[in-house]
Amino acid sequence: MKRFTLFFAVATALTILASACRFHSNDPYYLSPYHKQIVDHRKSQDSFYRYHEASPFVVTQTLFKGLDYFEPDSTFCVPFELIVGNTNRIDTITDSKGNQRPMVVAGDMSFNLKGKLHRLTAYAIEGSHELFVMFHDQTNGKSTYKGGRYVEVDSQKGLIDFNYAYYPYCFYTEGYACPIVPKKESRGPGGAGGEK
């Protein structure tokens, strides 16, 4: 009985998490809170790249023409399980300038997306409960950057949302050193979501 109760509680929790990504309406002009949150985030990103002094476009005085995105798709927002192994694990990642960067591994992120089980390495962001994830998928070199993309995940929410996937600065302009997505991370969502 206890085992059934635990299973039911876990299943219910995962259902609640997944429902946070979903939106339903017959009105084509309706924006759900989830959909609107993504749209507002993208407007904020465009504003940052266009005006902020830390923007790679502003720094290099490059004309900013706006970012391209895939349409928001709630099926790219799913619950994940963080599998924590060796707490002292460090990966050495090569960046775009050939430097070796030590990065602290928070754990392996396991999630089911479109009926397939995926597993990606999640890196700790110092002083934050967010996790940094790099990935390749089948869109690279076709509709997205061949070097792969990044996504940051709030570990406290328990959801990974590829609608927030983005490119490293070195995609836009030279002069930046960005972590190169390791070949082992060729286990991304296998579809389109986020920046393109």
Image: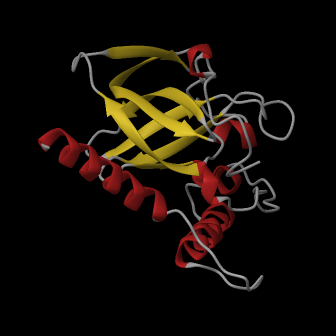
**Residue toward you, 194 or 76:** 76
Report the quarter where the N terminus lies: top left
Residue 153: percent from left, percent from top: 43, 47
Residue drawn at (72%, 35%) of the image: 174
Residue drawn at (69%, 49%) of the image: 193
Res 70 quadrant in image: bottom right
Residue drawn at (68%, 31%) of the image: 148
Residue 179: percent from left, percent from top: 55, 26
Toward the front, the furthest residue is 1
Location of residue 122 with respect to 153 vertically, above or below: above
Q: Is residue 190 left or right of residue 78?
A: right
Residue 158: percent from left, percent from top: 36, 49
Q: Is residue 39 left or right of residue 99?
A: right
**Residue toward you, 75 or 41:** 75
Location of residue 50 with respect to 40 vertically, above or below: above
Q: Is residue 157 visible?
A: no
Q: Is residue 40 visible?
A: yes
Q: Is residue 165 left or right of residue 160?
A: right
Q: Is residue 196 left or right of residue 18?
A: right
Location of residue 75 with respect to 66 vertically, above or below: above
Residue drawn at (62%, 31%) of the image: 188
Toward the left, the furthest residue is 2
Residue 90: percent from left, percent from top: 33, 16
